[in-house]
Structure formats: C-alpha cells, structure tokens
Image (cartoon, rainbow, N blue to C red):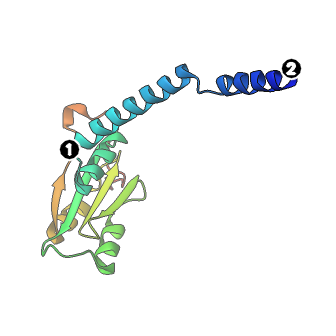
C-alpha cells in the first residue's frame, strides 16, 4: 500500500508542478496587447504615396537639391528620355529614382545641376523643384559642373 500511496503522491506532485507560470502567461498577454496597439496605430497613419515617399526619402537623406521630371505627355520614360537626363546630369548627382513605373525621375544631390543642363531638361520635361530654400542652403552648393570663365 505504501508504494501505491507513494506513486499517487508523485503523480499529484508532478501534475501541480508542471502548470503554467502565471507571471509568464500574463507578460505574454501584455506584450500581445502592446503589439496590437502599436499595429493599430501604424495602420491608422496615412500612408504616403510612392511619390511622396520618394520625396521624403530624398529629404531624409538631407539632399539640398531635389528635382523631379515628368514627361509632358504623362507617359513612361523610355530609354531615350533616360539617356537624355543621364547626359545632362553630372556624376555628382547622389541619387536617381525612377518611380510610378517609370512616370517620373527624381534627382537628389548636394550640388546644383548646371543651369544650361537644367534649362534643356525643363524644355523637354515637366519640372518640379523640391529643393531646400536658399536660406537653408550651405554656402558651398555651386554647380557640380564648373562654368568656364
């Protein structure tokens, strides 16, 4: 009889010792609630369009000059358009972004595009300037392409 009593006591002890830890269970529930609240906040924020997101990325990179070009007919940039822009932008342009399935090109730089090149691109494309204001620009933002004196 004592062996049966010992086995029963062992089973009783093991079944109560293997229960879940309430502290861990509660912290898991709290973490899940916090995660759901965070996800809810993120989903309630307005999402930036691809264009707005690209402009914001250029601003976050702290570029002094942000130029946007679109085709005048609203179409997609073809290989000739891309070559035209590439030939007129200096190598100092830090970032080029083709967006909306090729409907715009955004250039981000800390150097001005040479005035002649910018004029040629403005004649061919719709131009938008999202650059910093003159008062925000550092003193050394001359054209990347040096003009002959």
Give percent across and percent down for residue 26: 47, 23
Q: Nearer the viewer, residue 20 or 123?
A: 20
Residue neighbourhood size for the residue with mark 2, other residues' Cα within 10 Å, grouped as few (<14), some (14–19), many (≥20):
few
* Label 1 vs label 2, nearer the camera: 2
Give residue 117's quadrant in the image: bottom left
Give percent across and percent down for residue 65: 28, 47
Residue at mark 2: 2
Give residue 87's quadrant in the image: bottom left
Q: Residue at x 34, y 40 (%)?
A: 60
Residue at mark 1: 46
Q: Nearer the viewer, residue 28 or 102?
A: 28
In the depicted structure, whether residue 78 falls above or below residue 89 = below
Query: What is the total number of numbered labels drawn onto the structure image?
Result: 2
Q: Residue 96: in sight, yes or no?
A: yes
Structural distance between the alpha carbons of marks 1 and 2: 71 Å
In the depicted structure, whether residue 54 falls above or below residue 137 = below
Query: Which mark is first along the chain, 2 or 1?
Result: 2
Give the secondary structure at mark 1: loop
Give percent across and percent down for residue 91: 43, 59
Which of the numbered marks, if any, corresponds to residue 55? none
Q: Is residue 88 left or right of residue 76?
A: right
Q: Residue at x 32, y 47 (%)?
A: 58
- Tell me if label 1 and label 2 are in contact, CB under 8 Å: no
Q: Residue 115: in sight, yes or no?
A: no
Q: Residue at x 24, y 75 (%)?
A: 76
Q: Is residue 129 left or right of residue 143?
A: left
Q: Residue at x 20, y 47 (%)?
A: 130
């Amino acid at each position: 009889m004592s062996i049966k009593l010992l086995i029963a006591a062992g089973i009783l002890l093991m079944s109560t010792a293997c229960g879940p830890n309430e502290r861990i269970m509660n912290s898991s529930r709290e973490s899940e609630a916090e995660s759901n609240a965070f996800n809810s906040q993120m989903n309630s924020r307005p999402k930036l369009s691809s264009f707005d997101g690209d402009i914001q990325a250029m601003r976050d990179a702290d570029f002094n000059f942000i130029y946007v070009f679109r085709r005048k007919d609203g179409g997609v940039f073809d290989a000739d358009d891309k070559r035209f822009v590439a030939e007129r932008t200096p190598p100092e342009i830090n970032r080029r972004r083709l967006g909306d399935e090729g409907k715009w090109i955004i250039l981000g730089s800390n150097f001005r595009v040479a005035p002649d090149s910018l004029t040629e691109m403005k004649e061919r494309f719709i131009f938008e300037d999202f650059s910093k204001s003159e008062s925000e620009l550092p003193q050394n933002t001359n054209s990347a392409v040096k003009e002959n004196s």
